[in-house]
Amino acid sequence: MVLRLSIVYFAITSFLINLTTMTEKIGKETLEVISSADQFNKWMFQIIKPFIKGEVLEIGSGIGNISQQFLQNGYSLMTSDLRTDYCEDLEKKFSGYLGFRGVTRIDLVDPHFKAKHGELLGSFDTVFALNVIEHIEDDILAIANCRKLLKAGGVLIILVPSYKQLFNSFDIELGHFRRYNISKLAKVFNVNELEILHTQYFNLVGTLGWYINGNILKRKIIPEGQMSLYNKLVPFFKVIDKILGNKIGLSTIIVGEKNL
């Protein structure tokens, strides 16, 4: 009996390890595809730029696609990620930038979060996490810990995938727990006593590509050729979002302020 349980335990553990490894591999491949989309990354940066102030911390920097936009524009930025290999790469990539304040490993649901990151608590004017919170099962705790890193009056900027109806093979392969809308994400902000300053959707045209590739074709990774074409058409897509008032989009964005 003990032997059978041991075998079952080993099999389940091996499966979970392999699944995590596959998810991490696909996640990095996706980031690498997006890294070549300079116009798209600039667009995302421009969307959140009006809310950025002071000392900035990026949660889940990955391979630095958005970090680079901040540092090239002269911001003071500390980067972070859960993965140590990403942290090492970020240090190498950005150490020469004047505004680079280093990199730290942050797990937003670490039970010892306050003890491990005591020197960072209440240190930042802006904390932002783009396409991060959907990877975390306990999103309320994740946002609570983001809040702890802010100074009084500091702002938290969160961007996450939109609409549960668009949950598909991409989300599964990337390790997403959920997709949001403004109402759903706002509830997480409200629970954590963050005053909501701004809400919007982002990237309307992207919803069509996401649906066709993920829901219909069941692809596991964004096709590089499609991303390249999309990147060239970003100026046109920006106009569409502006005309329609950011009422629909592949991503949901909320900006909140810590008042206490």
Image: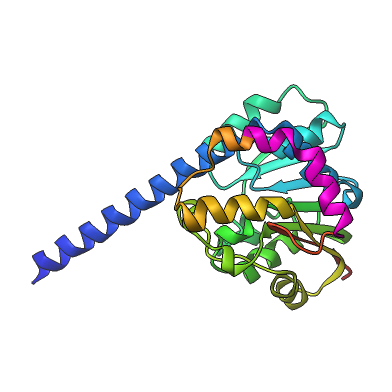
Report the magenta residues as a range. 228-245
- The secondary structure that most of the magenta stretch takes on is helix
Front in this rendered view, residue 238 or 159: 238
* 176 left or right, relative to 61: left
Front in this rendered view, residue 108 or 241: 241
Asked if 156 appears above or below 236 in the picture, the reply is below
Q: Position of residue 252 (x, y in %)?
A: 73, 61
Residue 234 magenta-highlighted = yes
User: Which quadrant: the N terminus?
Assistant: bottom left
Task: Give the residue displayed 82% in from the left and 59% down from the top.
Answer: 246
Task: Give the residue displayed 56% in from the left and 48% down from the top.
Answer: 82
Task: Give the residue displayed 33% in from the left and 49% down from the top.
Answer: 18
Asked if 75 appears above or below 136 in the picture, the reply is above
Q: Position of residue 93 (x, y in %)?
A: 66, 26
Q: Position of residue 136 (x, y in %)?
A: 56, 62
Front in this rendered view, residue 52 or 99: 52
